[in-house]
Image: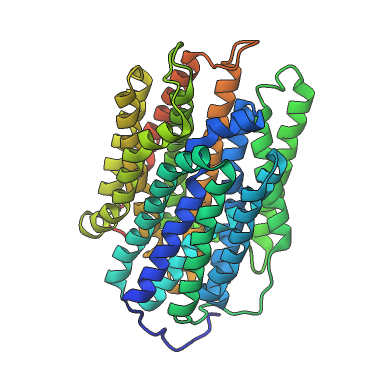
Amino acid sequence: MTTTHAPARPIGKAAVGALGALAVATGALESVVTPTLPLLQRELDMSPAEGALLSIVLLVTGALITPIAGTLGDRYGGKRVVVRLMAVVCAGGLVSALAPNLPVLVLGQVLQGAMVGALPLSFILVRAHLPAGESKVAIGVVSGLFVGGAMAGTLAAGPVAEGLSRHWMFALPTFAVTGATVLVHRLMPHDPPRRPQGAGIDWPGLVLLSGTLVTLMLVLGLGADLVTQPLVLLGLVVLLAAFGTGWVAVERRAASPMVDLRMLTRPAVGKSCVLTFLICVGTSAATYLVPQLFAVPAHTYGFGASATAIGFFLLPGALAASAAGPISGIGVRRLGSRAVVTAGVLLMAVGLLGLAAAHTEIWHLVLGKALVALANGLCVTAMVTRTATSVDLGDTGIATGLVLVTRVIGFAVGVQVTGAILTAGTPSGSKIPAESAFVAGFVLAAAVTVLSLLVVRTMSKGVKE
């Protein structure tokens, strides 16, 4: 039974600004790997599959942390949890900055993954301190600022890595996260808990979900290499099924589950999760494949771009994604979530098919990536806003955490699949994938994106169902 507390004190512009600064800083720290992945692959001698793994380690950790962060935020208050979470993120950023090799860098990325849990905590704070109408726009603004931070990280990572070193591209945004966390701690008033504090953490659920996600990544990442070892591949698939089945069984019986699967039975939440997963699978193809295509040597079919140039080429997409958050928040308020998501899905399909058909000029890739980034921002922000405003205030963290978890899983699955496609499409003795492997990745992502229209048609026009 939900406990009753006095209403939270309204917040001013300074507190909202502190949340925005934290969103920008965490977005920047999250994004530095994408434009510099070819550089990291060269310096650390990684294969395409290992590069794909590095690019999603942070997100997999986020998928585990997010539901816990949302639950604890509902239980103890968003501010109290977000400050502690950011301490872990800062530690991870420093580990990544000091990493001498791939294993240590992966450890740093694992710790940095705690930042993904900051978004549902921000939504808890926004809903606790702002009126309903203002909170819808504020959620869109916070989401947009996170993407804006990603834009800054994307643009700056290459020049910092090439001008200073790869170590500094992690250290600088980590310092920014530290400063923003201090501002949140000083300026944001405490929000009252919305749920009873007696229940503990669902550790069995956490362990089983961890096993499920790690095994899934192994199956997707190593599947192409294990074709000649069918028994090993079969064993991983059986292990994945066992982890997944066990996790669902534990969560359905737990008194205080890590992920409240009953929330998925609510149409607004369940449909948002399915749509977010499909859309992020599509988005991940452009996010992973476009920088790789830019880096392919110019004497073949690529452009031989440096990390700095790749960051510059990705800037229009980052700008589009930054604008998408506020636009989506306003669009949902005026037109309804279904209209915004439909427009986003169609834009994404056009962008992905365009990338598959035309990628011989730099502007082809820049335009296609921008369309996909804009579409993803419109869709995901609409899903998060729709979910956050369709549940009780005390369920905000859990519900939005579910959507963000499916976002992370969708992105991770998409990156691993496209990484496996590139690995399988790399001729023996060469480090350059065949051009057809890129085309196959874009076409597959477009097909998954179009499939999401079947779910969009079942949505109601408004925010609530």
Q: Residue furthest bottom?
A: 6
Relative to 232, is 27 on the left or the right? left
Could you tell me which quadrant the C terminus lies in? bottom left
Residue drawn at the location 65% of the way across and 38% of the way down: 216
Q: How many marks?
A: 0
Place of residue 361 in the rendered image (x, y in percent of width and height, measured from the top left): 32, 19
Quarter of the image where one finds residue 146:
bottom left
Q: Residue furthest front?
A: 163
The residue closer to the viewer here, 90 or 129, is 90
Place of residue 371 in the rendered image (x, y in percent of width and height, measured from the top left): 31, 36
The residue closer to the viewer here, 21 or 464, is 21
Vertical arrangement, residue 20 with respect to residue 108, above or below: below
Could you tell me which quadrant the N terminus lies in? bottom right
Relative to 9, is 165 on the left or the right? right
Q: Is residue 259 visible?
A: no
Vertical arrangement, residue 397 with respect to residue 229, above or below: below
Relative to 417, is 440 on the left or the right? left
Vertical arrangement, residue 210 with respect to residue 128, above or below: above
Q: Is residue 435 visible?
A: yes
The residue closer to the viewer here, 157 or 377, is 157
Residue drawn at the location 59% of the way across and 59% of the way down: 89
Place of residue 96 in the rendered image (x, y in percent of width and height, measured from the top left): 63, 49
Residue drawn at the location 24% of the way across and 60% of the way down: 333
The residue closer to the viewer here, 262 or 232, is 232
Quarter of the image where one finds residue 464:
bottom left
Relative to 349, is 421 on the left or the right? right
Place of residue 207 in the rendered image (x, y in percent of width and height, measured from the top left): 72, 54
- Color style of the picture: rainbow
